[in-house]
Image: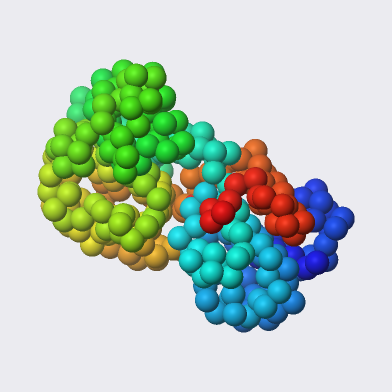
């Protein structure tokens, strides 16, 4: 059995796969595996160990005639043609739950950093502008007691809501289906999207990327938000219309944005959004803690080993 691993993974997990398989590993952390090499290597592969930056599409499935299982080291799977995998009877594994707390932490970090101008404050010192204390210097927005609107109440949304309880926040949420069982537990109120946007001081986008959520936050939705509101996106860039967001931020019809994900990644350093001082950006590191990334890689390896044995995956998207 051959496993193609499209990025460097911890030695112990590579060894785990090596015990029962032949592995080809693209031994890089940042550089994606070149497409031509991926297409070549999958020709005799039984499994692909992938991640958010590879496109596992019809071309890959056609090239990989022996493929038995795909494991992605992520919760999101918008980069994989799941319908095609299902049509071919290929299970696709992913890694939900294990990353929820880390992504919830980073979501909160972006809320705090944007509201309290953390990056602007550091740059202010580094560029030598700090001459003294000022009553209104770098004044931001309150987080404590503010209203939080969570779009997408899965594991990460619930983690954000639990943190928000400690900040005394009023919690609104919008989800495909109402989660009444969570409402009492988290003190969260279900809200139609427009009402959530109108009432929230922080709007946190955590919905998965699907055709239905594409540009879910666009010009109309941004125009409903409060002028002091902050939008945080730690889900997928495609869920927000970036051009509309740029205009709302530039014209200050909303107060700020904290973004870990972008329509096109990596975002170019000369992208218009990055010229704005009311934006805090990060390079898609929502789940990037040592422990979480190790656990994500471990579950991916386990999903693949299960799939190669023809047994149910730990977390399967399409079975
Ligand atoms: C995911 O798991 O989908 C993240 O975006 C990658 O960390």
- Please state which of residues 305 and 195 is positioned toward the viewer in this rendering: 305
The image's colouring method is rainbow
Say which quadrant the C terminus sits in: bottom right
Q: Quadrant of residue 245?
A: bottom left
Instruction: Name the residue at 61% across, 64% down.
Output: 90
Asked whether the viewer can see residue 190, the reply is yes
Q: Pinpoint residue 183: horizontal percent, then vertical percent.
A: 33, 24
* 183 lies left or right of 54: left
* 148 lies left or right of 19: left
- Please state which of residues 3 and 316 is positioned toward the viewer in this rendering: 316
* 170 lies left or right of 51: left
Q: Pinpoint residue 169: horizontal percent, then vertical percent.
A: 29, 22
Q: Is residue 131 above or below residue 163?
A: below
Q: Quadrant of residue 309?
A: bottom right
Q: Is residue 251 above or below residue 27?
A: above
- Please state which of residues 63 and 30 is positioned toward the viewer in this rendering: 63
Q: Quadrant of residue 289?
A: top right
Residue at the farthest right position: 19
Instruction: Name the residue at 58% across, 76% down.
Output: 60
Q: Is residue 22 above or below residue 225?
A: below
Q: Pinpoint residue 1: horizontal percent, then vertical percent.
A: 80, 67
Q: How many marks?
A: 0
Q: Is residue 13 above or below residue 148?
A: below
Instruction: Name the residue at 52% across, 76% down.
Output: 58
Instruction: Name the residue at 80% across, 48% down.
Output: 12
Asked whether the viewer can see residue 130, the reply is no
Q: Pinpoint residue 200: horizontal percent, then vertical percent.
A: 21, 33
């Amino acid at each position: 059995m051959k496993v193609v691993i499209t990025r460097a993974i911890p030695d112990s997990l590579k060894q785990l796969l090596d015990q029962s398989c032949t592995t080809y590993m693209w031994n890089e952390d940042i550089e994606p595996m070149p497409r031509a090499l991926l297409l070549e290597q999958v020709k005799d592969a039984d499994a692909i160990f992938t991640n958010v930056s590879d496109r596992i599409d019809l071309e890959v499935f056609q090239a990989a005639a022996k493929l038995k299982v795909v494991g992605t080291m992520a919760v999101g799977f918008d980069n994989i043609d799941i319908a095609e995998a299902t049509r071919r009877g290929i299970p696709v594994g992913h890694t939900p739950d294990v990353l929820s707390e880390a992504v919830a932490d980073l979501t909160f970090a972006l809320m705090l950093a944007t509201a309290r101008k953390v990056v602007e404050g550091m740059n202010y010192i580094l560029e030598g502008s700090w001459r003294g204390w000022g009553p209104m210097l770098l004044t931001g927005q309150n987080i404590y007691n503010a209203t939080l609107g969570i779009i997408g109440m899965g594991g990460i949304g619930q983690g954000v809501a639990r943190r928000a309880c400690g900040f005394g926040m009023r919690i609104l949420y919008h989800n495909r289906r109402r989660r009444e069982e969570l409402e009492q537990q988290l003190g969260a109120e279900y809200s139609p999207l427009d009402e959530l946007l109108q009432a929230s001081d922080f709007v946190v986008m955590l919905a998965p990327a699907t055709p239905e959520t594409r540009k879910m936050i666009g010009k109309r939705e941004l125009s409903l938000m409060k002028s002091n509101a902050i939008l945080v996106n730690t889900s997928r860039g495609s869920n927000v219309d970036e051009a509309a967001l740029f205009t709302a931020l530039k014209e200050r019809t909303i107060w700020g944005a904290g973004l870990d994900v972008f329509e096109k990644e990596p975002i170019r350093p000369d992208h218009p959004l990055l010229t704005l001082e009311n934006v805090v950006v990060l390079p898609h590191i929502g789940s990037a803690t040592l422990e979480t990334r190790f656990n994500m890689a471990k579950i991916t390896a386990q999903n693949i080993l299960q799939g190669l044995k023809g047994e149910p995956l730990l977390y399967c998207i399409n079975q």
